[in-house]
Amino acid sequence: MSETNQAWFDRAVRVIPGGVDSPVRSFRSVGGTPYTVASGSGAYVTDVEGQEYLDFVQSYGASLLGHAHPLVIERIREAALRGTTFGAPTPGEVLLAEAITSRVAGLEQVRLVSSGTEAVMSAVRLARGATGRSKILKFDGCYHGHSDALLVAGGSGVAQLGLPGSAGVTEGAVADTIVSPYNEVPTLDETVAAVLVEPVAANMNLVRPVPGFLDALRTECDRVGALLIFDEVITGFRLAPGGAQEYFGVTPDIWCFGKVIGGGLPVGAFGASAKLLQNLAPTGPVYQAGTLSGNPLATAAGLTVLNNVTRADYELLTKRAQTFATELVDAISASGLYACAPVEGPLVGLFLSGEPIVEPKNFSEAKVYCENGLYPKFFHEMLQRHVALAPGAYEILFVSMAHSQADLERALFAAADAAKEVAKS
């Protein structure tokens, strides 16, 4: 059996394109060889060489309670012993749907799917089918999964690889997709079926919505009869117990969820009012299906997470993350670099520069800092200090409920040392 990260990566590239099953895991934008994770526990992961890392990737936000939470693992085990998939209704999907809808004001029903990409793709189809309109508006730098119509001007891995969209996506597939700058309210017309937005843009590093932006989107959609879709794959049940709707006080027409609601297993969901969802098959003409939708292992894990996080937990996580963001900027700045760590709830971004930073308000402003060459150096210096960040400047830091105060202090010491080394170069 291979025992080094390099050996495992060499094996991977022979049988997996680029050696990874998702481009965001690639080290293409930072250089070097990816570490291959053998296990994880709480705030830490351990690679195949036995090296332990303090982990701020946390499966890109899926692990709210940290890796391998004992209660989540036990519920998955119990569910697996009853069977892993049936292609038939199960109690678990009902219980998870009840948990989701009971927490989000205005959300009456959800349809469970297997990924965030699938959730958003289905929500867009629902919006078009319900309105009879064809156009969708998204914002520059926001990433909504890899469906054809939404890859144009995407953030996350699309931006990290320097792609404007994707080869293989036809002009026709994106002909009805309109792209606007984030934090600027577009003027819509009656051809627009829906406006799709990340309530907090977390795929162009972290860009916060300016005050009034989401409210104004709601008003503009209402003016022309378009539907407002919140992509809460990242923000859902992380910003607050009721997600972005509770946090910002703005109610969309359609919600999309993922990550947290699967407790570390593959899952997604989209939801709306019962009236709007009557457009979905089998009761309506908008078709959507999935063999593994509502998978009993995923619903057991997700329900366990939602049922074991209190409002006080959210408040503590938010306070801890916000303090960490402030101290992270201080630690880096004291070491010779300039840093900006925007924070919204418990979500933390990190921009680096050799000059004073103005917090970005859109993708074009974020891109200046993400592509100045400093992040790859900082990433590797942190990795040498056994702190794992996402291997790309367009991603954010995820502080889980498993990160202790001591863990965060350790990260701050590592960041100060890493910044000194980067500043020297």
Image (cartoon, rainbow, N blue to C red):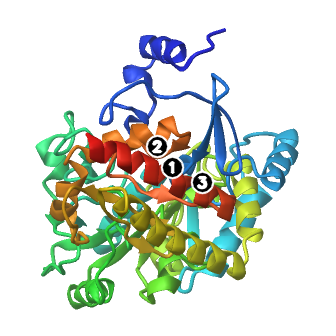
Q: Residues within 10 Å of mark 3 (few under 14, many from 20)?
A: some
Left or right for 92, reference 212: right
Instruction: Report helix, strand or loop for mark 2.
Output: helix
Q: Residues within 10 Å of mark 2 (few under 14, many from 20)?
A: many
- Measured from the top left, where is residue 48 in percent x and y? 63, 23
Determine which of the numbered discs, if any, sits on residue 410 in the image. 3
Q: Relative to the observer, which residue lies in front, 190 or 211?
A: 211
Tag 3: amino acid? Arg
Q: Residues within 10 Å of mark 1 (few under 14, many from 20)?
A: many
Determine which of the numbered discs, if any, sits on residue 122 in the image. none
- Measured from the top left, where is residue 135 in percent x and y? 19, 65
Circles 1 and 3: CB distance less than 8 Å? yes
Q: Quadrant of the C terminus?
A: top left
Q: Quadrant of residue 139?
A: bottom left
Tag 1: amino acid? Ala
Q: Which residue is mark 1?
A: 414
Task: Determine the residue positioned at 20% across, 39% down.
Answer: 169
Using the rendered image of the protein, determine whether residue 395 is visible from the camera's viewpoint.
yes
